[in-house]
Amino acid sequence: MREMANYKATYFKWHVEGGIAIISLDRPERKNPLTFESYAELRDCFRDLTYADDIKAVIFGSNGGNFCSGGDVHDIIGPLLKMDMKRLLDFTRMTGDLVKAIMHCGKPVIAAVDGVCVGAGAIIAMASDLRLAAPEARTAFLFTRVGLAGCDMGACAILPRIIGQGRAAELLYTGRSMAAEEGERWGFYNRIVPAAELDAEAIKLAKRLAGGPTFGHMMTKTMLNQEWSMSIDQAIEAEAQAQAICMQTKDFQRAFDAFVAHEKPVFGGD
């Protein structure tokens, strides 16, 4: 296992408060685009989070009033036009690996979205477990607007499971912007929060999760992801096994002891 409270990021902002890792991209003057370097570092960071016992929850936040404007036009899209198929596939696999790393990091990930959230930024929000939005948030899976397919970084698999096939098809075909209220109504956003309160609400939610049975949260996240490809019978059996494992944790005993004592349980994550 490793500790990440003192992790030093190069291409994005990172700090830890009480076991909660807070990440945001750090190019606010350009609405926080991604680069080859930030893609790779984020992928590696989320992979490392799998083994970080000192991190209980993650917030991927906004910076300067915007979440992420997608891949940088000059730093990414321009160079892509000069690459051969092998290098292009290396890149698209790397971007997909970021989504897999977010989904498999074992920690609840909260996206706190303000302003622009488009392209790969919308994908990062999509890959998160919970999503809060400021009223000004504008989310677009705009890949078709730059001549590409809507099937980017798992969008055609994940987005329909969040908002439904027809709604996902509309967003992925047209690349149009989804307003915050529409996103909440469709189930993409869990809640709309005033922009001035967005960070505080994300931290409040993360603290609630971090104070819970974090081993149980890891198992919940794992099952939410794995059961997409299971039959109902397989899912019920997988959950039976997962819950039996959780029943062997000290947190299960702590919850029982607290109930008997008429106290609030204090979980330890083991």
Image (spheres, rainbow, N blue to C red):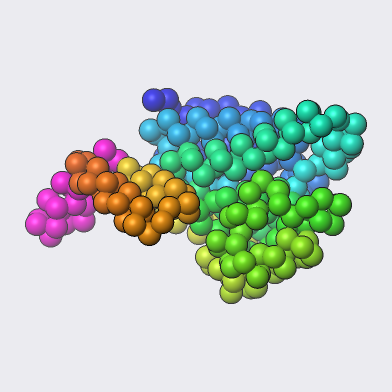
The segment highlighted magenta reads 252-270
Horizontally, residue 29 falls left or right of residue 263, namely: right
Q: Is residue 69 magenta?
A: no
Horizontally, residue 84 falls left or right of residue 263, namely: right
Question: Is 205 located above or below residue 17 in the figure?
Answer: below
Q: Is residue 267 magenta?
A: yes
Question: Is 10 located above or below residue 211 in the figure?
Answer: above
* Residue 89 drawn at (x, y percent): 74, 33
* Residue 232 drawn at (x, y percent): 38, 59
Residue found at x 82% / y 37%: 76
* Residue 235 drawn at (x, y percent): 36, 54
Residue found at x 85% / y 29%: 84
Foreground residue among 89 and 48 = 89
On the question of residue 193 being in view, the answer is no
Give the quadrant of the N terminus: top left
Q: For residue 73, what is the image quadrant?
A: top right
Foreground residue among 165 and 247 = 165
Horizontally, residue 140 falls left or right of residue 102, namely: right
Give the quadrant of the C terminus: top left
On the question of residue 240 being in view, the answer is yes
Residue found at x 65% / y 53%: 155
* Residue 2 drawn at (x, y percent): 42, 25
